[in-house]
Structures are given as structure tokens and as C-alpha cells.
Image (spheres, helix red, strand yellow):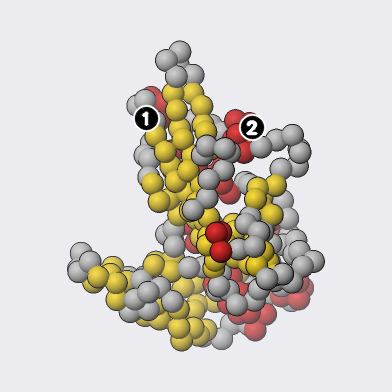
Amino acid sequence: QEFTPPVPRGGIKQAKAFIDEEMVYPAEAIKQSLAGTVTLTFIVEAKGQVKELKVKEPVNNLLEQEALRIFKIILWEPAQYRGQAVESKATFEVPFSIKHYKRVCKERGYYKLELPDRPIDSSGKVYLYKYTDEAPVPVFKDKNKNMQSFMAENFTYPEEALRRNITGVVKVNFIVEPHGRISNVVILNYLGAGCAEEAIRLVKILRWKPGELDGKLVRVNMSLPITFGLSADGGYHVTPAAGGTSFQ
């Protein structure tokens, strides 16, 4: 294929899942039974920056503002033409359905995002963890837990991977947002047979203390390698990077 269009970082499927995880349906819109799909048009530059972001057709201001808020969190991979990144137009839809939203909220366990009572960097800039004053760290309800015990408790070795004796490392990259949840999940080091999907599932149920720079909570780019291993007696294990966490 000579040309491939721009895609959200991690792919369309991850972007749709993120909408469900991030959306806060405006209360007034629910009260008025407002629903519909907000279609956004924009240009993705060759370096991945977005410009000329617009709402294609008016739907409702409340829904449009929430669609824009969610969209601005999503990072984009540029279009490719003959193996080279190029600038290209794109569209993205954010659907609003009250029935779907209420079902999603029950599944995810919250209706509103818990925002920190600390100043937040509103620029949208993403920082590497090594350039922050305080890097994000995982937070566990039980103070005796660490990354290793968390994974041991929540991990399920994919059946296909067990059947095929597949082992190795899955490296998951993501952004820790100022509210402590993650976005823009993508696999950097792929391992098949369901291992990549299990690594993403594990990472998504983690909660984080967000990163800080110059007294403000900021978006931070992180990577977590997860080792899938099998033992000679037929058992298995999952291991985070040495020391419990390793971020790049």
C-alpha cells in the first residue's frame, strides 16, 4: 500500500476504548437527553502534531466541548506515503449515547474523573519521565503491595501462549495523565498469542501518582517491560522489569 492514513497512537480500537474510559458526559446534556456523534476534522503534520482542528457539523456545544477535550489527549501517528511520514487531513468521530455511557460507567466504576487538587499544566505537552521533578509511580491500595505482587495477583497467562509455549517480553508504552489514569497505550515490543493484549490489560488497571514539573502535574511518557515466562514444571510467571519498574 503506497498510502496509509493517520491513525491514533495505539490504533483505532485503543482510541475507542479510551473514549469510554475518559468520557464525562455533560450533566446538562444528560438532563436534556442530548446525544449524537461529534465529527472532528483536522490535519496531522508529518511529525504527528495536529492543526486546524474543527467540528465538521454542529451537534451541540456541550457535547462538542467534551469531544474536543478527549480528542486533545489523543496522540497521532502521521500518514505514510511510500514509507515516509507526510501531512494529511483526517476525521475522527466521538459518539455520545446516554444509554451506552451509563453502561460504561457501571463497568469502569466511576461517573466522573477524580481530579487532583494540585495545579495542572494545561499546555498538553508530554514530558519524558527523566525531565520531570517527580516521575509518576504506581499507587496500590494495599501499602504492602508492589508491582510484582500486583501482577502476580492480577495476571492471567493467555491460553494460546501456554499451548504454544510462548515466552518473552512485552514492552508497553503509555502516557500517565495528570489525573493519574493512562492514555495512548501502544505496544513497542510485540509478543503474540494474546500476550500483548494481557500486558495492556494489566497496565490499564494500574493507578498512578502523576508526574510533577515546576510545581504542576504534567503528562509523562512511560514504558513498562513485562516478562512472560514458563517453568519446567508447567507453571508460569509474569515479571515486571528488574526492581519492580523500569521506565523509559
Residue 38 relative to residue 91: left or right: right
**Residue 125, picture quadrant:** bottom right
Residue with the mark numbered 1: 166
Q: Is residue 42 above or below residue 228?
A: below
Q: Eyeballing the image, is 64 above or below 239?
A: below
Q: Which residue is mark 2?
A: 149
Q: Is residue 45 above or below residue 144?
A: below
Position of residue 116 measured from the top left corner of the image (x, y, whole percent): 76, 64
Q: Quadrant of the N terminus?
A: bottom left
How far apart in space, not on screen, are marks 2 and 1 (Cα)? 22 Å
Residue 129 lies left or right of residue 115; in this view the side is left
The disc, 2 or 1, on the residue closer to the chain's N-terminal end is 2
Q: How many marks?
A: 2
Say which element carries label 2: helix
Residue type (three-letter) at the residue carrying disc 2? Ser
Q: Name the amino acid, label 1.
A: Ile
Please tell me whether mark 2 or mark 1 is closer to you in this view: 2
Which residue is found at the position 39% from the left and 34% from the top?
168
Q: In this rendering, does residue 107 appear at all? A: no
Q: Tag 1, which secondary structure?
A: loop
Q: Residue furthest top?
A: 233
